[in-house]
Amino acid sequence: MTRSPHAARLAAFSAAALALSGCGGDAEDTEGASAGDGAEPRGSYDIDARTGETSARHTDGDGTTTTMRSGEKVPVALPAGFAVYPGASVTNNTRVEQADGLLVLLNLESDATPQEMVSYYRNQAEAAGIDVATSLESGPVTMIGGEGADGTSFSFTATRQDAVTEAQLSIGRGLE
């Protein structure tokens, strides 16, 4: 699966925002502005001390705004045709939005086997018009991925540890 440089930059933005979440407390980053120079902040992040949710916002030089929310309690809103695996617990939800673009990265835990979860998400992806062209099984890890004609990218990875399957679902589309 090939990702555009813009998608890679957006993923890096998300990773940086998540790394900042480990800093604790509420904060605002006034990127590109020195104290007293009158420049407007281009980016900010906030960590809700009560819920642990991290939110970030960045505006590019061309005015494109990208927002991110990440945390266990962030409401899950998957693209049409996708749903949380029945009985699975959401351990983290990261949602990145940019204009009409969207990236959802959902971490799950379930008693189901990786094969059961992979089958469930393969069926959803194929029904959504995604060509699941990548499939890999290595030890306890199973991964599938693909892309739709409309540019929607999809990946699902599941790892069995003891009696629990830890999984990650990623669905993105329209990011620049």
Image: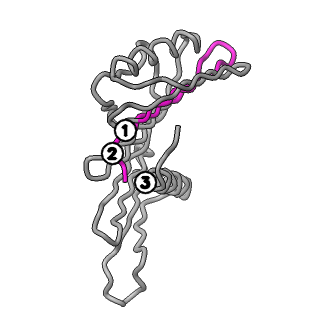
Give the magenta part as a residue range. 153-176
Callout 2 touching callout 1 (CB < 8 Å): yes
Mark found first going from the N terminus, 2 or 1: 1
Q: Residue 172 lies in magenta, yes or no?
A: yes
> Alpha-carbon distance for marks 2 and 3?
27 Å
Q: Which residue is mark 1?
A: 151
Callout 1 touching callout 3 (CB < 8 Å): no
Q: Seen from this angle, which residue lies furthest front?
A: 149
> Alpha-carbon distance for marks 1 and 3?
32 Å
Q: Which residue is mark 3?
A: 47
Residue drawn at x 30%, y 30% is 79
**Residue 145: percent from left, percent from top:** 51, 28
**Residue 157: percent from left, percent from top:** 56, 26
Helix, strand or loop at disc 1? loop
Is residue 175 shown above or below 107? Answer: below
> Alpha-carbon distance for marks 2 and 1?
7 Å
Q: Amino acid at mark 2?
A: Gly
Helix, strand or loop at disc 3? strand
Mark found first going from the N terminus, 2 or 3: 3
Q: Nearer the viewer, mark 2 or mark 1?
A: 1
Helix, strand or loop at disc 2? loop
**Residue 91: percent from left, percent from top:** 49, 30
Q: Which residue is mark 2?
A: 174
Is residue 175 shown above or below 110? Answer: below
Q: Nearer the viewer, mark 1 or mark 3?
A: 1
Q: Amino acid at mark 3?
A: Ile
Asked whether 48 or 140 is in front, the reply is 140
Q: Residue 115 lies in magenta, yes or no?
A: no
**Residue 76: percent from left, percent from top:** 34, 31
Asked whether 124 or 4 is in front, the reply is 4
The 10 Å Cα crowd at callout 1, few under 14, some 14 to 19, many 20 or more, is some
